[in-house]
Image (cartoon, rainbow, N blue to C red):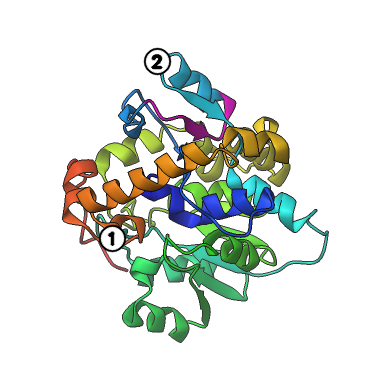
Amino acid sequence: MFPDNDWYSNKKILFDFCGLKKTFPINSILQHGWFSFYDKNTIKQNKYFNTQYLCWSKKFRNFFYRRGVNIKAIGSPFLYLCKIKGDIQKKKVNGTILFPSHSAPEFKQYVDHEKIIKIVKKNCKPPFGVCLFYTDYKKQIINLYKKKNFQVYCCGNRADENFLYNFYGIVLNVKTCIFMELNTALIYCMYLKKECKIYNKDEFGNSLYSHSSLTQQRTEKSFLYKYLTKHKASKNKLYKIARIELGYNEMKKRSELIEILNLKRKFSNLFAYFFSKIYDIKFGKEIRLGLNDDKYLNEYNSSFFEINPKIKKY
């Protein structure tokens, strides 16, 4: 129904878990990513016909429910993906994969790839890999990592129905996951009991990427940020945090999920189908496909700006 329902294969995973082979618009709004912080303005799309918002965790649900939002917690689709894949077998894993801070169709992100490569190779063990977001999967960046003996991966664009399936396959056999910021992929890796670390500054205290200053300031106050940068948190401790953030205890049975998603209600599905078409006409189909769109940028990202485009080199 809403364009981001189709992002990162979240809807596809829920349909797969429910035993449906083909996806279609649903009369719901799916939380498609993890929030390191949120406030009363985080959920904006719920104004349309008071459509139900399906979030991940109980604490997220409680925050907005008290503010009059029609919201239910069902657990992250990534948890259902792990259920589909079965129990994670205990086997020997090795190597390190880097997840650089990334651009998006709505904004550009500057990353000092050369410097983060040096830091990772100095502090982590090979073999090395890097997972680039599709907006940064460009020849110049790819070649830079290949020259430093990094295996280069990409999960696909955000409208790819196999996005999280690809992510799962890439991460499963890796021992250590390196990030430059708190993000959704980090929480997934914590749940998979990977060694997770954050490298976001060089030895001079310079940021290794550009970002919204407000976002960075609030993120650095997060308890999780402190765990990953100032304390040595165990994999089990991070796993327990991830379970809460992903809403493990809020997961539903297949029959419950089918009912909540209204998958067998023809009128609801028909309404969602026509609404999705109207939405595409008004804002552009490019949003649903994960492409750039000026209307989307002006509507939802007017406050974003880049800082620190040039930082001190070694």
What residue sits right under mark 2 in the picture? 67
What residue sits right under mark 1 in the picture? 286
Position in image of residue 260 (x %, y %): 59, 33
Is 39 in front, or is 279?
Answer: 279
Quadrant in the picture for the N terminus? top left
First in residue order: circle 1 vs circle 2? 2
Numbered range of the magenta stretch: 50-58
Residue 29 in view here: yes
Compared with residue 289, is residue 196 higher up or lower down, i.e. above or below? above
Q: Secondary structure at mark 2?
A: loop
Q: Quadrant of residue 243?
A: top right
Q: Secondary structure at mark 1?
A: helix
Q: CA distance from mark 1 to mark 2?
A: 32 Å
Q: Residue 52 colored magenta? A: yes
Mark in the foreground, 1 or 2: 1
Quadrant in the picture for the C terminus? bottom left
Q: Residue 154 colored magenta? A: no
Residue in the image at 78% along x and 56% along y: 88
Q: Quadrant of residue 271?
A: top left
Residue 28 is tagged as none
Position in image of residue 114 (x %, y %): 37, 72
Residue in the image at 32% along x and 63% along y: 111
Amino acid carrying mark 1 in the image: Glu
Residue in the image at 58% along x and 66% along y: 166
Amino acid carrying mark 2 in the image: Arg
Is 51 in front, or is 196?
Answer: 51
The outermost residue toward the front is: 267
Residue 5 lies left or right of residue 277; in this view the side is right
